[in-house]
Amino acid sequence: MHVPGWFGRILFRLSRPHTVFIWLILPGWMSLHILFTSPGLLADPGPPQDRLHPPPGNIEESPPDQTSPELFQQRQALLPLLYRDRQQEAVYHEIRRAFETGRTIEALQLLQRLFDAEEDSFYWPSTTSAPISIRSAARDLFFSQTPGEWELYEQLNSAAASSLLAEAQDQKALSLYRELVRRFPFTSAGLQARRYLVYHAIDRHKFHEAHHHLHELITSEIHSQRILDSDHHLYHFLKYQIQPDSWNQHLSNDYELRTAMIERTSGRSYPILQVSRSELDENYFSAATHNRNQTVWREVTPPYLNKVWSASHMESSDSLLHQTMQYWEEEQQSELKPSAVGWKPVVVNETVYVRNYNDITAFNLHSGEMLWRYPCQSQFSPLLENFRPHGRMQSRSQFSQLTSELNLDELLVGNNLLGTITHDAKRLYLIDEVELKSLKAPIPAGVIAHTDNVFDESQARRRSNRLIALPLHQSEKLHSLPQKPSWTVGGVFDQKNTRQNNPLSGHFILGPPLVDGEVLYLLSEHEQQINLIALNAESGHVLWKQGIGWVEFMIDQDIYRSHRAATPVLAHNLLLCPCQTGMLVAIDRSSGSLRWVYDYRELNEIQQHRHWSRRRNSQRGHLGFDDHPVVQGNKVLYLPHQSESLHCLDLNTGKVLWKKLRKDADYIGAVDHNLAFIVGRKSCRGLTLRNGVEVWSNRLGTPSGRGIRAGHVYLLPLQSGQIASINIQTGEYAGLSHLHQRVTSDLTGTTDISPTSPEVKQIGSWSPGNLIASQNYVISAGPRGITVFPQAGSEIYQNPIPGDRAIELASGTGQLQDNSATSAHLRQAELNLILDRLEEAQQHLEHCLAVKDALILDERFQVEQLLKEVLYARMRTEPAQRDRHFQQLKSFASSNAEQGRLLMEEAEFQLMNGNHQASWQNVVAVAEFDLNLPLTDTTDSTLTITPRSWIPLMRERLLSTGGNTFLHLFELQTERCLDEALNSEDKHRLEIFLTLFGDGEPAAIAQMKLANRYLDEGQFHRAEQLWLNVREMSYPRLATLASQNLVSLWTRFGLYQLAANEIEQQSAGNLILSMQATSDNMLQLCLSQIQKKNENVLRVRIDEERWSEEGAELAGYRIALNPQSTSDFTLITKGSGHTGKLSLLDRQSGTILDDIDVPTGSLSNQLYRNQVCGSQLCLGGD
């Protein structure tokens, strides 16, 4: 019998004959061992399985409180995942018994052996609601003793502590000082070591770490007599400094770290920290004092979407990998899903390091020149080529097959284990030698079934990988590295060699390391145990290791963890370890001790009662977004993929402060002034850190990558092709960041198109990806490559206006002889607009308009469009100057679209000021334009809306806020306009009336009149739709007339079944009696249509033509609408939903009967549920 998993391996070992014999004599041997050699319990911890829970039977532990079933269930679900040591728990209970029985020296010796243990473990007493560290429990037990016992502890351990202190001072080794603090924290030598660590941390601006060590000294009763006044002064100084300016020390947010300086002042013997406060500036993007020599901006600013250079992740646009990612991007866009991937570059000095799907490549930041390339062992191109040897993908069905076979979302899109790289000043760190084929097959319930032979070579490859440290500085520019990596750790376990030279052999490293000076912190998994490991950054040698938990399934059996990077996050003096198993563990950075664990799993009732409760398999959010914790002050925000909630925890205790449903949230963008910016699939939200209450919500579009913070603004990449600048506090746009919505990039393969051309919106093959900012650039990393843009702030100073060049006209030509100054003014206007500096932008644009007759057509169009955007923005933000800006805009409004937009702006302004009648007059004026005319939206100039859609929205807003006075005026105008529309020969007047007054009996009368007009003109489908609408209204007389007209129309076109159903369903009794004979006739006619003639059959020939097989005429179609179940027809759309074709498919024959032109864009699947669709037949007309 084969039992998989860790239990199977233990059972296999215990089932051997010699093992059975050992277990028979083990109880007697353990009794003698405990009796005579109890001080040596920790000498040989043994293999991990021998120390695994449950605790031994001789531990005196009362059963959990049965009166709290929720706590009991939580305990039962979490205990199997915790890292616990049976021997350490046994020693702890022995220490308690020794203190209680007066065996003080023995208790102190055992206590020191517990402090000397290399690893900590969790311990969950029945009296606590959460697990605690065994070291923490031992310290609390020691603190509860008398001062005499503390002094005795000093006498017993002072020699060993002093010897270790002398060794640390001689070698000047930080690791020895930390070891001394861990092993002998309550000795005088431990006190000196802590003071050293305090000043060492202050020297390197690690103020939270310094505060942590000083807090341990100040609050310790044991050291109370040894504390100096300078310690108190320094403690209060650090406490004051870390409170107002807490920051997240995660590597991806390096730009948030404030610059700090230590200086000594007269009259003080301790350092003073001076921190810049950029968040106190009023402007969104704050620059230093303006002067001619200004060349840089003080902080990150939005990009100017005019690319500097770009590089593709693929070797060729004809490669299978390129085709696969192109199909995937199109599918994501058609389904309104993010196209973000978990691949992010890093920048060190003047070099950009990118990991693509096959290599690590280094580019020059300024020019894009490739410096070198390192080929990785884990490559995706060969994997795809093996799947499809011919190397071509001919149809979407082949792409769907590839997606299902290879688990594309996990393998490529969300594989940030390979896509994430970290670095320090000397080396680049990445994960390689990952067995990609193990993710290839479709796995039921998230589990891959493998044999459990630990020496199987293929299985060993799946359960291990390698951490590689590449040197950053290369002497020659080569396409491959001229030398080997600086060092590597991990890889497949080799039975022939021990782990002496490679202690991480056979480990699966869960993500690239966190760099903390000369120390690297990483998470690894080995034999179902997750460990936090500290490495020396120079050599890769292991400094210490701490187990943090267990997993139910090995890494090669869990596709939800095998591709997700888990990198520790540095939060003050804690290392937050996201294990991707349902729990978040915090570890003390200095001592490696466990601090707390938080279980964020939502377990159902069945899982809660299981002894080993595995987490739910479903993943929330887009896998291309990271889910690392974000720290602000003493709060931790966590939005894991395995949870349905956003969690806010206390950093020091791990207790949950609040939880909110994640809704459509994908990731936590930024935190600013106690407000969290949450990026969602459809909308973004601002939540307070105090209680998670939603402050604002805004529908910004589908995100296409992880953005970056720029002061008070968050730069959000969107699927629409823009990088939006969003005020974190209000959710509103800051500056016109959408000037260039689409960018011509080498990644798209398109021809060069001016970014200001009206056709620029038609380019739909590029969207920004994950953003990083470095120096004067913003880098976008998408699924097919990277693109580098200049920052708008730096562009202002690097492209000054040439003051010594005059604008001259060529004689008789009317063209500019030297247009460099005009182009510079235009560029400066764009940059100031992006930075929300409206007045400066207007000055530059007006300078260009002074010579508008000399400008070419494209430049003149661009200047006028930008000036309009400036005036609209100033009209909203400067009420005192609104009339002047309005009149200036009116002079530019030459087309119907521009005049309509201006009227919409005026209507919104009057409504905001409570002038409902004036606002309604502007709404009526908008209705005079073409009702289907696309007008620029008043809230977002990147969106368009038609009067047919905008007017009903404004009408509802006016009626809901206008009161009885406006309602009375509205009713009077409704009667007058109805009479005019009914008496008019122009059907356009009826359409305007229905748009303005779309509800009530007057609207029903107008619809009946307009339906007759459509019927006379042969627009039968429009007439049918109007009659269907009237039939659903609560006006019996009009509903009866509408039903009679529908019956006549359907009879005319041979739709007898629909006509019969309409007659039977009417509730007006007289109508049913009078038309009963007609109903019978309808059913007879319907029956005759489907009955076959009675003819003699001589022989039968059966031919099979399966409609389920995709034919050429049906290629690219997909179901888009849900018609009625009784309908004989199905509506489908062509291609990805953006081609503007709606086709009528006969359900019986599978043939396309007709095509209908519809507006471009995705067709909603909810159309049938929200309105009556009619017969869905092409009855004629538009």
Image (cartoon, rainbow, N blue to C red):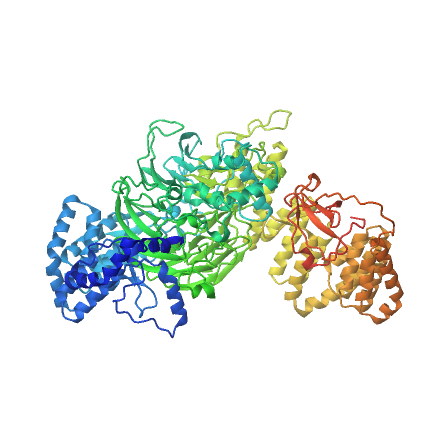
Q: Residue furthest front?
A: 17
Q: How many marks?
A: 0
x, y percent for residue 668: 45, 53
Locate residue 853 relative to residue 405 in the image: left or right. right
Q: Quadrant of residue 659?
A: bottom left
| The residue positioned farthest toward the top in the image shown | 811
Q: Is residue 1114 left or right of residue 1064?
A: left
Q: Is residue 588 visible?
A: no
* Image quadrant in which the N terminus is located: bottom left
Q: Residue at x 38, y 35 (%)?
A: 350
Residue 920 percent coordinates (x, y) = 69, 59
In the rendered view, would you say 427 is above or below 227? above
Residue at the spot x=75%, y=50% of the render?
A: 1148
Rendered view: 41 above or below 376? below
Place residue 68 in its image quadrant: bottom left
Q: Nearer the viewer, residue 912 or 636?
A: 636
**Residue sitting nearer the eye, 715 or 896:** 715
Q: Is residue 1048 visible?
A: yes
Residue 502 in the figure: left or right of residue 995: left
Spot occupied by residue 232 in the image (x, y as percentages of width and height): 21, 60
- Residue 873 horizontal/vertical position (percent): 56, 49
